[in-house]
Image (cartoon, rainbow, N blue to C red):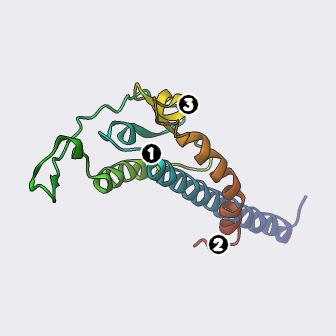
Amino acid sequence: MPSLSTSSNIRIFAEQLEAYRKKTHKRLDLAKQELAKKTLAKLVSKSPVLTGQYIRGHKVSLNSRSQDVGTAPTTLKMRKNPLKGKQVGSNIGVDRRSIEMSVKGKGLQTIMQATYDDVIYISNNVPHRFFVEFLGWPNVPAYHVYGMTKLEMQAQAKAIVKAYENKKIP
């Protein structure tokens, strides 16, 4: 039969092990969230914006790919041609900054809920996504938004995880 001090030592060791497990999981949570935030920011910054439909199509989901097409109504803003002082149809555009902030904000709400065992999906289901990513249009090459971002983030992933290895967790 184990002595009282042995069972006490086992209990203390078990408590220390549990505390270590919680801190390790928290570090993994933070590293995964940071990687997802940076990935989303890169996707958004690399996305072309004409009407805003493609950039609004970036959806963040946990444990299953979003089927949402993301075809929110696009707000077009007429810009004045400073040389002529009148509205010109060719200068129709959208406010890229406000679209970026909106997409990042919605994505961050989902990302911050992720834990170490969740799979974070960032996808885009707008109908013209294949043209943007792979095919392009006449006189406009493909952007390869997801492909290039994946390569860049794979190169950064190890450094991001390493930064959280020794981070102080309360």
Image position, residue 86 (x, y; %): 8, 51
Could you give the CA–CA distance between mark 2 and mark 1, rounded to whole angstroms? Answer: 33 Å
State the mark number for residue 134.
3
76 to 18, vertically: above or below: above
Does residue 75 appear left or right of residue 42 in this picture? left
Q: Are marks 3 and 2 in contact (CB under 8 Å)?
A: no
Residue 120 visible, this orientation: no
Q: Residue at x 29, y 39 (%)?
A: 51
Q: Quadrant of residue 72?
A: top left
Amino acid, disc 3: Phe
Image position, residue 70 (x, y; %): 35, 33
SS at circle 2: loop
Q: Are marks 3 and 1 in contact (CB under 8 Å)?
A: no
User: Which-is-in-front pick, marks 3 and 2?
Assistant: 3
- Count neighbours of disc 1 (C-alpha within 10 A) and say few if under 14, some if 14 to 19, many if 20 or more: many
Amino acid, disc 1: Ser
What is the residue that sits farthest to the left in this orientation?
A: 86
Image position, residue 103 (x, y; %): 36, 48
The residue tagged 2 is 167
The residue tagged 1 is 47
38 to 77, vertically: above or below: below
Q: Residue at x 83, y 71 (%)?
A: 5
Amino acid, disc 2: Lys
For the C terminus, which image quadrant?
Answer: bottom right
User: Which-is-in-front pick, marks 2 and 1?
Assistant: 1
- Count neighbours of disc 2 (C-alpha within 10 A) and say few if under 14, some if 14 to 19, many if 20 or more: few
